[in-house]
Every structure is written in C-alpha cells, then in structure tokens.
Amino acid sequence: MRWTKWIGAGLGALFGGPMGGIIGFVLGSAVEGFTESGWKDFRRHVRYDNPEAAGFEMSLLILSAYVIKADGQTSRHELNYVRQYFIHTYGAERAEQLFKLFKNIVQQHPVSLRQVALQVQSRFSHPMRLQLMHYLFGIARADGRIHERELELLQKIAGYLYIGAYDFKRIQGRYVRDITSAYATLGLSRTADPEEIKSAYRQMVKKYHPDKVSAMGEPYVSQAKKRFQEIQQAYESLKRERGF
C-alpha cells in the first residue's frame, strides 16, 4: 500500500542508519492488524518535532526485541512489561500504536546489534543511555530472573553503548537480587571506606540527576527521579551503617 511505504520512508529518513532501516522496512510492509486510519494515527503521534525523543522511542523498541529473544523464547511476562512501560510512559493511545510496531519488529530477522547500539551511542547522552539500560534490565527480569544469555547480551549492549563496568554493575545491582544491597546500588563492595562511598555517591548524583534528561519530557524525568531517590536512599543507609 502506498501509504505504508510513505510512512516507512519518512521514518527511515528521520532515524537513519540501521534503526531507520528496521523501522522503514517494518512500516513499509502491509502489517496485519493495521488499517490505513490506524497508520495515519500512528504517524500523527510520531514526534517529528522532537527527533531526539522519537529516536529514543525507536531505540527502546528495537533493543527490546533483542533482549526478549535473547533466551530463545518470547515470554508473555516480558511482552507485558514492555506494554506496561509504554502505557506508563506514553499513555494508552500512543502505547497501543507503539506496541503494534514493536510486535512486528520482534518477528523480523535480526540485523547487526552492534550497528544499532553504536547508532544509539552516537545520538544520545550518557544519562539517556543509562536510562535505556535500566529499561532493558527490567525486561530481562520480568519473568522472575535474568538468564545467563540475557545477562551476556546486556553486557554486550552496555559495551556498545559505552557504559563502563562501574555503571553496569550499579544497574545490575538493582535487578539481580543477590547483589541488591546499598553497596551495589552505588557500584561498591562492602570493603569501601567512607570516602569511597561519598565519592561514589557524588558521581551517581551527577550521572542520574533528573535535570540530565529534562529535554526528554516528564515521563523520563519521572523515571530519573525514582532512580535518583534510590541512590539517595542507598547512601543514607550506608551512612547509618558506617556511622559517618
């Protein structure tokens, strides 16, 4: 259909690179369950006025598909996590259209994860990439545990996104239950001294302050505030435990 090709071409040009190729291919096909009015509604919601936010949304969709397929099966719990995240972040109407697109992306043949992730790395700030990793960890844990292949994939994605081992460990500490202590939240071991704890806290505040993602809009600021609160709570817990 001409209208799907037009939308596919438009979004492909908007995002460019491998992300644009995936989105263009998906939208350029006549996808079952999408009416012409439905596609027009989706196009109306695409944020052409804010390419950065639109590109971040597409990054969520594409990298979500990689994580969901990492352990060889598509979990209902993981799909529900993605759906609820979209609803919470974008509202029910927009989430419905994004989720339809997402399900079709999951069914496509994979393209280079490295190319997609490097495109994300080149376009988005470090705080935004940290937010993305939190989201991907949430998907992996949605079925109750993070499988070994999922963790390996998350480590690979983090490397492509230029997220260092220190930040990766801190994020992992929030989602992998055996290291979810306040120390892990700040990326520390239990042998850290008070000065190391204070230094780690200051670094976390700089990286995760909600102001760092203010350009993305209220949903992202709201999520950043929750993570910022976790960091503060972890620091206060350590202050009480260590008496400083």
Image (spheres, rainbow, N blue to C red):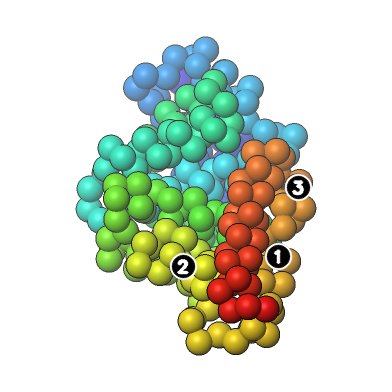
* SS category of the residue bearing label 3: helix
- Where's residue 88, x and y in %? 54, 33
Number of callouts: 3
Checking the image for residue 205, the label placed there is 1
User: From mark 3 to mark 1, how far is it between C-alphas?
Assistant: 15 Å
- Mark 1: amino acid: Val
Give the residue drawn at x 53%, y 78%: 188
Which circle, 2 or 1, is nearer the viewer? Answer: 2
- Where's residue 164, x and y in %? 55, 75
Q: Earlier in the sequence, mark 3 or mark 1?
A: 1
User: From mark 2 to mark 1, how far is it between C-alphas?
Assistant: 18 Å
Give the residue drawn at x 36%, y 62%: 177
- Left or right of 105? Residue 162 is right
Q: Does residue 123 appear anywhere in the picture?
A: no
Which circle, 3 or 1, is nearer the viewer? Answer: 1
Q: Quadrant of the N terminus?
A: top left
- Mark 3: amino acid: Ser
Q: Around disc 2, counting alpha carbons within 10 Å, would you say few (fewer than 14), some (14 to 19), or many (20 or more)?
A: some
Give the residue drawn at x 58%, y 66%: 237
- Mark 2: amino acid: Ser
Q: Around disc 3, counting alpha carbons within 10 Å, would you say few (fewer than 14), some (14 to 19), or many (20 or more)?
A: some
**Image quadrant assignment for residue 212:** bottom right
Provide the residue designation for mark 2. 181
Q: Earlier in the sequence, mark 2 or mark 1?
A: 2
Provide the residue designation for mark 3. 214
Give the residue drawn at x 43%, y 39%: 82
